[in-house]
Amino acid sequence: MPAGAVDLRCNTEELLAILMSREVHDWEISACGAVSMIPAAALLLAEATHAPHAEIIILGSDELSHNLGKDIHFLTQRGQLELFFHSALQFDADGNFNLHVIGDPNAPDRRLPGGYGSGLMSYMSKRILFFRTEHDLRTFVPQVDFVSGAGVTDERIQRSNEPFKVFTPIAVLRFDRDTRQYTLESVHPGYTPDEVQARTGFPLVMADPVPVTPPPTDEELDALRGEVRSRMIETGTYPDWATNVLRAP
Amino acid sequence: MGVPYIPVRGLAGTDVFERRDDMMLAPNPFDPNEITVVALAQNPDVAILHGLKADREGNAILRRFGEDVMVAQASRRTIVTVEEIVDKVTPEDTSGQFISSINVTAVVHAPMGAYPTGVPGRYPRDDEHIRRYVNASASDEAFQAYLDEHVMSLTEDEIRARFAVPSAK
């Protein structure tokens, strides 16, 4: 269970998969990248519950990747990909994120892959969901070390202007491009808005009161651990991860 | 494609864009309200692609997935290495992606030529060897030692023996 005082009856990965699955819309095209276990579970859970007609693309799956090759790029460039999942190492006050390096970009402490998705997918998919399995001041910083994707760009740059969301084990943050600010969209049961703010290195806009994230339901937990877990194992969609991380029913 | 550059949506405002001198911002000539990143055409002098089979005309079957044909079309010269040479390769062959001899400069018979990566249906990827390669790439010295051990110090016969590939003669 996450470290909060309230038992949500699931681990962090299951919680993030369930919360993000709620963002998948029926009848839309949604995709996740090549090493994306939690998003894969989220997509399959949405399909198993409220979005049975969702077109889902799981690039890291043996059977559910659609073998798109360059077509995923062109689909996205045309603006026809409606939802894409992203992770990042750092997020900053201006809505920039970093998926490239930690430290000085010319002599980085750590260097990661991810440049492609950051610079193209995140601009041209209609909606973006970010997630992190921790929520701390290393991740949410005043200024990122490297801009893999810019929160706000010149108004003559055509891109999606939808807000993006960041899911963590304690809260959901939302960045609005028109106001250029992060809002604390909801706080998970067991945590307080002040605690989320203290673990975030830039100011969060807060409603009064801040909504509480609806906890996982029985239906969501059952579908995730039953149908989704089996489907991941059967379709070669991170079967080891599904076996070990999603609790067997 | 033969175009000098291509507009790309995305990348504006990133440090990737800032660090590359082969990308610029340019107006959309058809729409004054839009600017895009434009990326300089990439035209390699030589592309080397590995495929399943080729004929002596230079028609070949490449791996099923991937953008190999596009790479060949962008390059000034293209060398295709293949697992086997056959009498005739046609577009009806569905074992992989067809590339016409129009786009191929030379063919090399190179069985096991993808090693240590694999060719689906022929031989698997050697993860252990790839790990060694990646570790060796951390420094010039280590990489030279890797090259000496696995490439430079071996004769063609020794390499053929290692992979159980019969002599060409």
Image (cartoon, coloured by chain):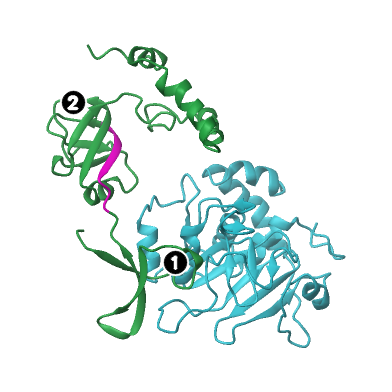
Question: Residue flagged by tag 2: what amino acid is it?
Answer: Val
Q: Which chain is cyan?
A: A
Figure label count = 2
At horizontal 29% and vertical 38% (from top left) the residue drawn is B48
Q: Is residue B51 magenta?
A: yes
Q: Are marks 1 and 2 in contact (CB under 8 Å)?
A: no
Residue B17 got which mark? 1
Q: Is residue A242 above or below residue A153?
A: above
The image shows residue B54 at horizontal and vertical percentages of 20, 31
- Between A15 and B1, the one nearer to me in the picture: B1
Q: Is residue A181 left or right of residue B31?
A: right
Secondary element type, mark 1: helix
Q: Which chain is green?
A: B
Q: Return the chain for callout 1.
A: B
Q: Return the chain for callout 2.
A: B
At horizontal 51% and vertical 65% (from top left) the residue drawn is A84
Q: Main secondary structure of the magenta part?
A: strand
Q: Residues within 10 Å of mark 1 (few under 14, many from 20)?
A: many
- Between B136 and B54, the one nearer to me in the picture: B136
